Every structure is written in C-alpha cells, then in structure tokens.
Image (cartoon, rainbow, N blue to C red):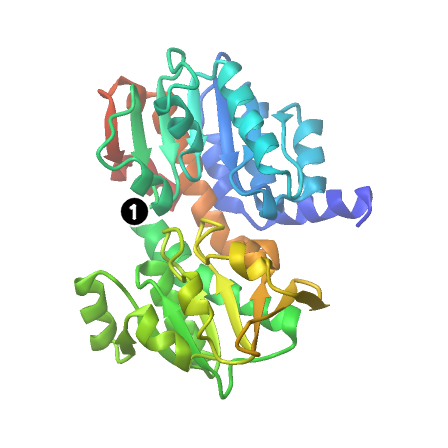
C-alpha cells in the first residue's frame, strides 16, 4: 500500500468515527500530559493519536501484540509527533525493551491493553513515581492485576457495558470468522466448531459461528459459564472431552495453554486451530511449531503430528481478527474508541485523585461517548 493510499485510508477512518471526534473535541488542553500507550497499532487507533497530539499531549506508543502491528500506522503516528517504538512481529526482547523505554520516559499516565507497563513496574524493573493513573482495556490485563495493588489507580474499561456488550460480545466473534473466511476461502458449513471460553467474546464466537453454518460446542472451566452455555443450547464439556470431535477449535479465554499440547495431539486430521483472545499463548504452539510444517496459503500453516494427522494453525496462534484481518468495523469501533477517549479524560482529571487500586471506569466518565 502506498503512502497516499495510507493517508486516504486514515481519512476514511476518521470520517466514519464521529463519536471519537466528539470525544476528542471535549478533552481539555493536555499540555503537560505524558501518556505511554500499549495497544494494537492498526488504522483505527490513528484518530485518537492525532487528536491527543492536537490537544498537546506527549505520547510514547508501543504495541500490546507484535503480530497485530501495521508498520504504515506506526509511521503515521510518528508523523503526528508521537514517539512510537514498535514494528510488525518485533521479537520478544525488543518488545520488552520498548516497554522499559516507555517507563524510563517517565509518563504521567498509562493506557494499556494487557497490563504490561504495570506488570513491569510491579516486577521491580521500573519506577512508577511519575505515574498518576492508568487505563486498562482487556480482561487478560485485569486478570494479571488480581490480588495486586499498583501504586496508582487503574481504571478497567473492559467491563464497561458498551465495550463488553458491543465489542467483546458482537464484533470479535464476527470479525474472527470474517478473517477465517477471507484467508482460507472456507466457510463453517458442515464443520463442528469448538469455542474454548464462554465469556462475552466466546459467546459472540459461538452465536456468530452458528449464524455462519457451524455446529457449535463450548468448553469452559467456570461452572457458572458452563451452565450458561448449556442454557444457550450448546453441547458443553471440557477441552479434553470435546476437542477430538471438532473440525475447528477457537480460543477466547485470556489464559495460557487453554488448548494444551496433549489435546492438540488428539485432534482430527485437518482440524484448524484459531485464537481470538488477547494473549498469543492461548494455544500451546511451541511443540506444534516444532513438528514438520508447511505454509499452504498465507496465514495458515500445516503441521504433521506423530499420529499421522495434520493440524492447521491460523495466524500462528496470534489474535486472528487483527493479525489476519482488520478487526472491528469502523462504525462499531467508533463506540469503543470514544469510550477509551472519555476514559483517558477521566484519568487525566478526577481519576488520578483516587487511591491506588483497580476500579471500574465510572458511568459518568463514559456515557457521554454514546
């Protein structure tokens, strides 16, 4: 894609994100704010970055997931005046160096997807003396913070109803299957689909898979969610019980090794493995990647198991909808990004006066985004 078409795409995104434009316009002057951001670096984040810079904020940006980085977007963020240290598929040591560099930059505020900044601080690798407040966008990030008190207030906006109910419940599942259809030229018809995890993302995956012709099963560890899945009409059980029946297994748990190697070894010949969760390790890919492999088409690798069967890994186990696709639609993500913008306004203001701890982003802080 050329620089001209990149600019055109960015302009198209901003045109179709009116809520985000209004939320940015409502922010006060941000001179003196030093915001470190760890997030997916795709086209839809550009309106926010440009808007924050126009309001006077200094920005240090890195990714929360190297597989979802768009290098052209990073270049656009730099052109807007942000310091951006990320590139597509950057190796783990470079990613950790970028996190450390962002904290050494002495930010006044954090905006995170996965809590890597806060985790680095709590591990003792960096000082948090300059940080006044943080915003966390993901369930996996909130899970990492359980039982831990950071030295500043952290506001959870993953569980805000319009994010949980719109983005998590509707868009992730829909766009995961869109990416699968686009890259494989296959549909879900006549396929048994196992959804692993039945939070709001898993629910969206299950219902959209059925809408697209799949026969759906659900594996879930939590007994209350498992009961909910039963009441929703799905065949339910554990990963060990159900994976061997599946033609396609998709994870949405926020947990490492939700589909372990022992389960992968018993999959049907030709079974697909996908991940829709934030973490890139929900599928135990290391032993699978060590098997003899080929790449029959982009974004799909074929791995020969000792049993004689083969397993297809989609996007190498990274987040499917943003690695192999474009993620949410602009109009749907407009709601998400507007809520994020108003959340930032909260931590730049009243939120930074709260005692250390993890809080749900207050309704008064985000309802104006609607």
77 vs 178: above or below: above
Residue 66: % across, % down: 59, 42
Which residue extends farthest bottom?
Answer: 190
| Nearest the eye: 86 or 50 | 86
Residue 34: % across, % down: 50, 17
Occupied quadrant, residue 153: top left
**Dot 1 surroundings within 10 Å: few (below 14), some, or many (20 or more)?**
some
Look at the numbered disc 1 and give the secondary structure of its residue: loop
Asked whether residue 40 is in view, the answer is: yes
Occupied quadrant, residue 340: top left
User: Would residue 296 appear left or right of 66 to someone viewing this image?
Assistant: right
| Nearest the eye: 265 or 278 | 265
| Nearest the eye: 187 or 243 | 243
What residue is at 74 percent from the left and 45 percent from the top? Answer: 6
22 vs 128: above or below: below
Residue 331: % across, % down: 52, 55
From the image, tell me which residue sits under label 1: 159
What residue is at 46 percent from the left and 51 percent from the top? Answer: 281
| Nearest the eye: 250 or 39 | 250
144 vs 251: above or below: above
155 vs 192: above or below: above
Which residue extends farthest front?
Answer: 306
């Amino acid at each position: 894609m050329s620089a001209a078409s990149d600019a055109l795409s960015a302009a198209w995104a901003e045109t179709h994100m009116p809520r985000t434009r209004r939320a940015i316009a409502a922010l006060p002057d941000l001179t003196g704010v030093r915001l470190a951001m760890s997030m997916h670096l795709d086209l839809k984040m550009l309106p926010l970055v440009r808007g924050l810079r126009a309001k006077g904020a200094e920005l240090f940006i890195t990714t929360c997931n190297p597989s979802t980085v768009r290098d052209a977007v990073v270049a656009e963020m730099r052109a807007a005046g942000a310091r951006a240290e990320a590139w597509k598929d950057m190796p783990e040591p470079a990613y950790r160096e970028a996190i450390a560099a962002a904290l050494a930059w002495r930010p006044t505020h954090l905006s995170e997807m996965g809590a890597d900044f806060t985790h680095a601080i709590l591990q003792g690798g960096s000082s948090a003396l300059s940080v006044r407040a943080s915003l966390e966008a993901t369930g996996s990030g909130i899970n990492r913070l359980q039982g831990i008190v950071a030295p500043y207030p952290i506001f959870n906006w993953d569980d805000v109803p319009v994010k949980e109910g719109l983005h998590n419940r509707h868009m992730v599942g829909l766009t995961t299957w869109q990416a699968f259809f686009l890259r494989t030229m296959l549909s879900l018809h006549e396929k048994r689909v196992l959804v692993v995890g039945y939070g709001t993302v898993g629910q969206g995956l299950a219902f959209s898979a059925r809408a697209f012709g799949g026969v759906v099963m659900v594996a879930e560890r939590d007994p209350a969610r498992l009961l909910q899945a039963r009441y929703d009409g799905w065949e339910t059980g554990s990963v060990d019980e159900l994976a061997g029946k599946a033609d396609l297994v998709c994870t949405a748990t926020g947990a490492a090794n939700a589909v372990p190697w022992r389960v992968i070894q018993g999959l049907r010949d030709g079974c697909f493995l996908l991940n829709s969760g934030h973490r890139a390790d929900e599928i135990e890919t290391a032993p699978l990647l060590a098997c003899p492999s080929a790449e029959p088409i982009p974004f799909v690798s074929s791995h020969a198991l000792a049993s004689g069967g083969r397993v297809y890994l989609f996007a190498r186990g990274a987040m499917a909808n943003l690695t192999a696709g474009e993620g949410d639609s602009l109009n749907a993500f407009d709601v998400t990004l507007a809520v994020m913008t108003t959340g930032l306004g909260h931590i730049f203001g009243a939120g930074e006066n709260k005692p250390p701890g993890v809080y749900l982003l207050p309704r008064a802080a985000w309802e104006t985004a609607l």
